[in-house]
Image: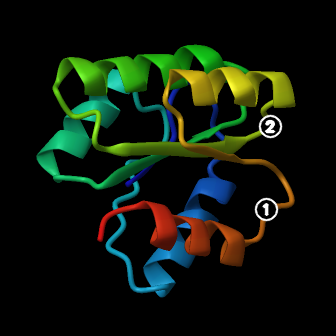
Amino acid sequence: MVAKPGLDGHDRGAKVVARALRDAGMEVIYTGLHQTPEQIVQTALAEDADAVGLSVLSGAHMTLFQRVVGLLAEADASDIVVFGGGIIPAADRTLLADMGVTQVFTPGATMAEIVTWVRENVGS
């Protein structure tokens, strides 16, 4: 699942990643713009998602990732892999990893890198 949390209205990157994963043979649900963490987790649970990829360009990545990870834990769904992308400083990427975000892709990551990572780290 690919989601665009918060008020950020720039979703080109999320759509490109969703398309690349789909073209690689994966089932992908793109939730659209302006999703709350609650909506994202509800959709992940309803769709039995193996992973949630969050695209955050707004600067609110720490709050949004933490809320999604926390809600998944509350729902006993910490087995859902959380990864993401956006303009996220290196120091924040370390903090995100500590809270359970398994990977963060920054500008310049190739679709091949993202597809390979998802294949190697999500599902069976």
Q: Is residue 62 above or below residue 4?
A: above
Crowd tier of the residue under label 2, counting other residues whose Cα lies within 10 Å: few below 14, some 14–19, many 20 or above: some
SS label for mark 2? loop
Q: Is residue 60 above or below residue 106?
A: above
Quadrant for the N terminus, please: bottom left
- Judge whether residue 58 can be spotted in this image: no
- Judge whether residue 101 can be spotted in this image: yes
Residue 4 disc label: none
Q: Amino acid at mark 1?
A: Ala
Quarter-of-image position of residue 35: top left
- Residue that numbered label 2 is attached to: 87
Quadrant for the C terminus, please: bottom left
Q: Amino acid at mark 2?
A: Ile
- Residue that numbered label 1 is attached to: 109
SS label for mark 1? loop
Q: Could you say where residue 27 lies in the image, as x and y percent from the top left? A: 32, 73
